[in-house]
Image (cartoon, helix red, strand yellow):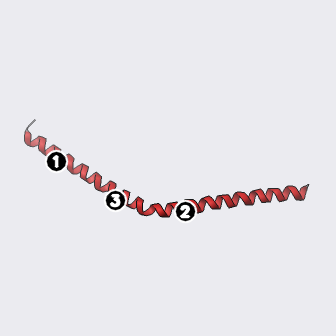
């Protein structure tokens, strides 16, 4: 293989890799900015599920108490 073609091929590949690095850095930065929001949303969703479960248990308990 000609040395110039070899160098051109590696330069092209280096540009592709640099492009990928920039794309991944942007994605990582976006993820880092969204992380506090997603953590809060997960916590809120968890507590909503706990509250819903407690209401269902309470309702079932009241229904059994009223029926029996």
Q: Residue at x 51, y 60 (%)?
A: 39
- N-terminal label among 2 and 3: 3
- Disc 2, SS: helix
Q: Residue at x 65, y 58 (%)?
A: 49
User: Residue at point 69% right, 61% down?
Assistant: 51
- For mark 2, what is the residue? 41
List x then y, in percent, for residue 40.
53, 63
Marked residue nearer the N-terminal end (1 or 2)? 1
- Mark 1–mark 2 Cα distance, whole angstroms, equals 44 Å
**What whole-number distance in Å separates the C-alpha atoms at marks 2 and 3?**
23 Å
Front residue (pair 13, 41)? 41
- Quarter of the view holding residue 62: bottom right
Q: Which residue is mark 1?
A: 11
Mark 3 and mark 1: Cα distance apart in space: 23 Å
Q: Residue at x 44, y 62 (%)?
A: 34
Q: Callout 1 environment at 10 Å: few (<14), some (14 to 19), or many (20+)? A: few
Graded by Cα atoms within 10 Å as few (under 14), some (14 to 19) or many (20 or more), the crowding at tag 3 reads few
Residue 15: x %, y % from top left: 21, 51
The answer to whether mark 3 and mark 1 are in CB contact below 8 A is no
Image position of 36 (left or right of 53): left
Circles 2 and 3: CB distance less than 8 Å?
Answer: no
Badge 1 marks a residue whose secondary structure is helix
Query: Which mark, by number, is residue 26?
Result: 3
44 left or right of 14 in image: right
């Amino acid at each position: 293989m000609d040395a110039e073609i070899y160098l051109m091929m590696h330069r092209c590949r280096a540009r592709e890799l640099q492009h990928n690095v920039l794309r991944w850095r942007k994605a990582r930065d976006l993820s880092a900015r969204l992380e506090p929001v997603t953590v809060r949303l997960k916590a809120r969703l968890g507590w909503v599920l706990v509250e819903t479960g407690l209401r269902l248990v309470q309702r079932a308990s009241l229904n059994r108490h009223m029926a029996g």
